Amino acid sequence: MTGKIVICRCEDVTLHELDEAVAAGHRDLESVKRFTGFGTGFCQGKQCVALCARLLAERGGEVPEAPITPRPPLHPIEIGRLARLLEDEPEKTR
Amino acid sequence: MPARRLPRSDDLPTVTLRVDGEDVSAIEGEPVAMSLLAAGRLVLARSVKYHRARGAACFAGRCDGCLMRVDGRPSVRTCRTAAREGMMVETQNVLGSAELDLLAATDWFFPGGMNHHEMFTWAKPVNQVMQVVARHVAGIGTLPDAPAGATDVEDVSADVLVVGAGAAGLEAARACAARGLRTLVVDEEPEPGGWLRASLPRLGPPSARMLADALVTQAREAGAEIRTRHAVVGIFDEASGERIALVDGPRRLLRVRARAWMLAQGRTEGAAAFEGSDLPGVIGAEAAARLLAHGILPGEEIVIAGDLEPRGEELEALAAALRDAGAEVYGPVDLALVERADGRNAVGSVTLRDAGRARKQRCEILVVAPRTSAAYELAGQAGARIRWQNGVFEVVPRDPGSRSRVWVVGGAAGADSIDSARAQAERAAAELADTLAAHDAAQGGPAR
C-alpha cells in the first residue's frame, strides 16, 4: 500500500491525478478523461466512469450531460477474429 | 478461513486446471476465476502501471481483475472462461509471481501516480530511456502462442435482436415472438435468466430460478431463438442504411441484421474511491451473489458497505444469504463510512469512520456496493440518449412517437423489480411490433 486511491483500476489512474487535472483547468468529464486516461482501459469505463463523474462534480467540475462516448468493441475481442470479417469480403479489402 | 465451496447435493463433474504449473481442481464449466478463488487464489493479476495486486472484483467481465493467459492466449477474462480439463492458466505481466511481483516497485516510485504530461520530459535522452523502461514495465500480457484459429462468420437476419436474457429480455422475446416477429436473443452468460440465476433478487432462490426456467421455456415456445455465451461487440450503421450488430460467440462471429433492437442488459455496479478499494478481496455485491449462486462462499469474515439508499434492502438480503452460508457478516454499513481497506496483497481489514471515530473491522472480503448505472454502452451506440441522474448514468426513456427502432427495457431502463421489468418489456414489445407493422403497411407489404 502506498496511499494511492485508485479511481480507474484498468489504467491505474489515481485520485491525485484527477485533482491534478482539475488544477490544470479541466472541468468536464471528457477533458479529464483525456488528461488522466481514466475509462480507456480494458473495461472501457464500465467500472469507473460514474465514479469519476461524481468525483469531478464534487470538486467543482461540470455535472456531465452524458458519459464518455461508448465505442466498439464493447466486449474485448481478439483482433485476429475481427480480421476474419475482412477475409469474408475480399473485394472490399483490396 | 479463505473462500470455500458450500456443500451441495448434486454431484458435478470435476476437472483439473494447470495453474502456473500447479494442479487446481475445478467444477467443469464454472468460471475459471471462481475455481481459482475456491482454491484459495485471490490474487490473479497485476495492474497495468503500478503492478498493484489484482483479483476478480465483478465476476461479470466488466473489470480488469481476472486477466490471465489461458492456453497461450493473453489477457483472457477468466471470469468469462469455462473450466475445462487440462486448461493451462498462467499469470501474465509479472516478474516473479502474482503474489510477489518485483515490478510492484513502480508503485513505490510514483506515490502520487504518473503524470504523463510532464514526467521525464525535461531532456529528450531521458525521455527516450524512460519510454523503453515503461514499455517493459507496463502493459498486459504478451502476444499469443499462435494466431487465433479459424473463426466462422455467420450472417443472421431477424426482426428483433434482444440483447440480454434476464427477466426483461426473456419477456420481451416471448412477446415479440408471439406477435410473429423473428426474434433472436443473445446473452453473455452461460445460461439464460440473468439475475434470476443469482440468489440476490427479491424473489430469492429457488423460486427465482424456477421463474427463469419458465420464462426461457415460454420465449422458446413462442418461437424465439436464445443463444448464450454470445456478447455484442458493437452496433454499426452500414453504408447501405442497414444496421448490423457484431456478436462474439464461442465458435463464430455473428453479423446480425435486425429491423429493431431490444436492449435489456441490466445495470453495472461501478466502483468507489478509497485507499485500498482496488485490493483483491474487494468485490461487488453482484459478484458476491454470483459466487453464492455457484456454491462458493468468498470468505468467512465479510464486511458489506454500500449506498444504503437505494440498495439497503438488497444488501440486507445479501448479508442474510452470506450468513446462511456460514459467514460472519458485518453490515451493510453506509459506503461513506469506509475510510480505507488495508492489506498487502488482499484486504485484511477495513477502517470505518463514524462521527469522527475510526474503527478497524477485520475482514477477508469487503463487499462494495455503490449506486448502479444502467448498462448504457450499447444503447448509447445505438442512438439512445444517456443522462446523469442521481449520481449515476441512466438511459433517457424513448419518446412516444419516436421513429427510433431501439427500445431499452428492464434494469437498464430503471425497472426496480422483476414484475416492473416484465411489464415494461411487454409494453415495449407491443410498441415495437406496431412500429414495424406501420412501417410495412406504409411500404405496401412486409419488408425483408
Image (tube, grey):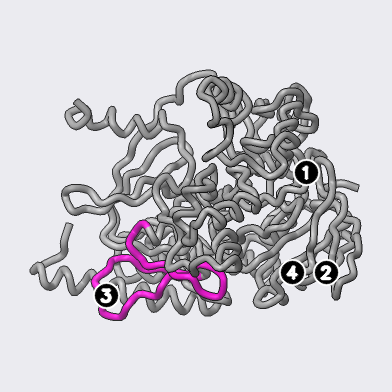
Rendered location of residue B82, percent (x, y): 61, 39
Residue B268 shown left or right of residue A64 in the figure: right
Q: Is residue B405 above or below residue B127?
A: below
Residue B74: quarter of image:
top right
Of residue B214 and residue B444, the one placed in the foreground of this image is B444
Residue B142: quarter of image:
top right
* Numbered mark located on residue B402 in the image: 3
Q: Which residue is mark 1?
A: A2
Three-letter amino acid code of the residue under disc 2: Gly
Upstream in sequence: badge 2 or badge 3: 2
Residue located at (16% from left, 49% from top):
B240
The mark closer to the camera, 3 or 4, is: 4
Of residue B223 and residue A81, the one placed in the foreground of this image is A81
Q: Which residues are magenta?
A: B381-410
Q: Which residue is mark 2?
A: B331
Q: Is residue B225 above or below residue B422?
A: above
The mark closer to the camera, 4 or 2, is: 4
